[in-house]
Amino acid sequence: MGRVGVLLLNLGGPEQLEDVRPFLYNLFSDPEIIRLPFTWLQKPLAWMIATMRHTKSQENYKEIGGGSPLRRITEEQAVALEEKLGEKGNNAQVYVGMRYWHPFTEEALAKIKRDRIDELVILPLYPQFSISTSGSSFRLLERIWEDDPELQKIDYTVVPSWYQRSGYLQAMAQLIAQELDHCPNPDQVHIFFSAHGVPLKYVEEAGDPYQAEIERCTELIMKTLNRPNPHTLAYQSRVGPVEWLKPYTEEAIPELAQQGVEDLLVVPISFVSEHIETLQEIDMEYRELAEESGIKNFYRVPALNTHPVFINDLADMVVEALESPSVHFSEVVRPSKRVKMYPQERWEWGMTTAAEVWNGRLAMIGIVAVIVELITGQGPLHFIGLL
Ligand SMILES: C=CC1=C(C)c2cc3[nH]c(cc4nc(cc5[nH]c(cc1n2)c(C)c5CCC(=O)O)C(CCC(=O)O)=C4C)c(C)c3C=C
Ligand SMILES: [Fe+2]
């Protein structure tokens, strides 16, 4: 066996408030996040949405201390995984490659080449596969690989998803049990799985297996937990007014309160690290909503971070991947057709996502008008002397 590397993939997050806008620009420039019929519209629209959204987004990051902890936690996971692999007799170098912020995937690949890695396990830190998360990172890697003969020499394998692994399920069940056992009436607590949402079209038209994997994951965690508590699955973090996977967390919580639920334990299941959607959206926004709706006790299960059972399972996953036949980018699910996520179907007043979209559309019209003017040499900008 030559030099072994592990590339951990994650989304990335702004580390300080100034990073928010360029981070959002990178995110919305990704066609796996917003699918448009014309690729040339992607960057101007990304610029528009980042411009319109960044102030609200910065406020959220301010509430959790001014930046995302995602990089710090992912790097801690990388160190813990490297140590665990060493203990198991596998000396491997672990790298972190983020999709939309530092350390970017490209930075990780430069280090992998510098260290002359021969075998590489590519492991997304998303338990369930979505075309918008692991899929997006795989597509980026595939494009970089195609143009780089040095990378092509590396014997690589990808792990598309791993939500069904017993180590991961046990770590989740342990965290849930711990929280339940701190509650005065553990059996009365309603367990509320809150998964990150994706647009419905991703699942129904583009063939994203995400919803099926989330549903199966929830069942498996409940089976591993082996407690009598009732449970619900809902989807959080919707962006834009198109339909996303339902039920929405912000609707499901008041419904449960109406049905008489008083004790609610929220379990975030699409993430293995604390980040803005656990620390701000769940801990602040959904807590406030739950309390206003009549929930008396709102609890939240922490993210796995460097939970020893989880890290041990990641290490086993790497060892198993090295021993199994390689899985290449071409074998991983990709969108079956182009699905449009924007524009939205209905208008909303105020600084809303609908307004963001209309601003984007107007900007597009403006850009097209300037191009036409540059070509024809006639138009309002020439008339007022700007061109
Ligand atoms: C607009 C579409 C988005 C889709 C689809 C989406 C899917 C998706 N995202 C995660 C995990 C994370 N998302 C994070 C940030 C983030 N995501 C979106 C949009 C979509 N995500 C935005 C606009 C943002 C920025 C924050 C904001 O302005 O609201 C992060 C990073 C969080 C951090 O701490 O910085 C993660 C992680 C998953 C798992 C997922 C689909 C399954
Ligand atoms: Fe997201």
Image (cartoon, grey):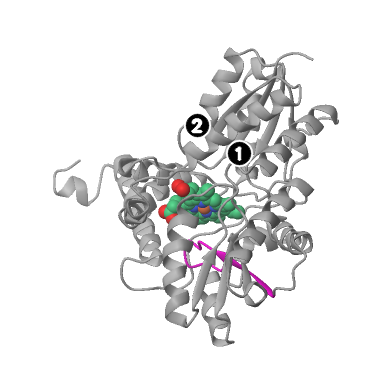
Residue in the picture at 68% in, 48% down: 127
Residue in the picture at 47% in, 68% down: 286
Give percent across and percent down for residue 347.
40, 73
How far apart, in angstroms, are the residues tagged by discs 1 and 2? 11 Å
Type of the residue with mark 1: Ser
Magenta segment includes 231: yes
Is residue 194 something one can see in this rendering?
A: no
Over which residues does the magenta segment extend?
230-243
Which of the labelled discs sits on residue 137, or is there none?
A: 1
Q: Is residue 70 above or below residue 218?
A: above
Residue in the picture at 74% in, 64% down: 222
Dot 1 alpha-carbon crowd within 10 angstroms: few under 14, some 14 to 19, many 20 or more: many
Give percent across and percent down for residue 307.
62, 44
Quarter residue 26 falls in: top left
The front one of 8 and 46 is 8
Is residue 290 something one can see in this rendering?
A: yes
Q: Which badge, 1 or 2, comes first in the chain's sequence? A: 2
Magenta segment includes 374: no
Query: In the shown orientation, is residue 195 left or right of residue 237?
Result: right
Give percent across and percent down for residue 245.
61, 66
The front one of 300 and 258 is 300
Type of the residue with mark 2: Phe
Q: Is residue 360 above or below residue 372?
A: below
Query: Disc 1, disc 2: CB below 8 Å?
Result: no
Which of the labelled discs sits on residue 101, or is there none?
A: none
Q: Quadrant of the C terminus?
A: top left
The front one of 194 and 339 is 194
Q: Is residue 304 above or below residue 343?
A: above
Q: Which residue is mark 2?
A: 104
